[in-house]
Image: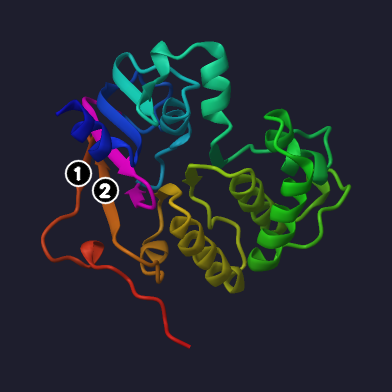
Amino acid sequence: MSTTKETLNEDVVLELTNVSCSETSSEAVKLRDVNLKVKQGELVMIHLGRRQNPRAFSSIIQGLLDPIKGQVSFQQTPWKIANIEQQFLMRSRIGRVFDGRAWINNLNIIENVTLRAKHHAFPAAKLQQQIDQWSKLLDVPSLSRERPAFVEASRLQRYQWLRAIIGDPLLLILERPMKTLDPEMIAPLVESINQIRLQKVAVIWFTGSDYEMTQKFSGIVRHYQSKDGKLVQAGGKSSFDRPHKRDSK
């Protein structure tokens, strides 16, 4: 019986069980007894108010902040019982696009983009292969030796996407990821999400834009609203629950 349960749960990438957090700021997303389970290849979009900041929520998911109550598990391992070595390996499989400060100012773009993968000893040849592959799909300019302060915002945001996707993540955390992007860049980024989900990568997308939820994502997308500390799922026969099919060409 336990073997059956393990088989059913092995595709669960992230699970929040009765999670509550202290309010780090008035803008932080509130969490009160939140339950959420995200499986391989799933896309979960969490809709935020204009002033809501997802940074603390993302850090709880990533095991960087402890909730005041409840448990967060990544690949069925709770952060609070994982040792330092386990946490290091777990974080190596999580990519993140930040809403707000995202760069180390005294490192250039090449160093910033590759820092996470190199920090976790990702093989150099495979890293370069992935940079080439995803740069082409995302239409990202060649990695430069410019400091982040000298790179315009739309290009910086594409570099953020590249940094999050390389390194074989199992989970992507995207915080308002289309912010500052030029409109013509939206379609390649949506397609990158469609492709990476085919590789069984789970995606949590924090959005404050109705425009983002109208994009043509493949498969079923689960939508939640953040209300009074709860994640309320949009139900019924709303467009939130309908799978989007890719255009045939």
Q: Quadrant of residue 2?
A: top left
Instruction: Indicate yes or no whether the magenta region holds residue 34.
Output: yes
Is residue 24 left or right of 232 when viewed as pictured?
right
Q: Which residue is mark 1?
A: 232
Establish if 119 lies above or below 141. above
Is residue 173 left or right of 111 when viewed as pictured?
left
Is residue 159 left or right of 17 when viewed as pictured?
right
Establish if 69 lies above or below 249. above
**Residue 182 place in picture, x, y as percent:** 62, 67
Q: Could you tell me which secondary element the residue under label 2 belongs to?
A: strand
Q: Which residue is mark 2?
A: 224
**Residue 94 place in picture, x, y as percent:** 53, 37
Q: Could you tell me which secondary element the residue under label 1 belongs to?
A: strand
Q: Amino acid at mark 2?
A: Tyr
Identify the mark nearer the N-term, 2 or 1: 2
| Residue bounds of the magenta highlight | 31-47
Neighbour tally class for label 2: few under 14, some 14-19, many 20 plus, Cα within 10 Å:
some
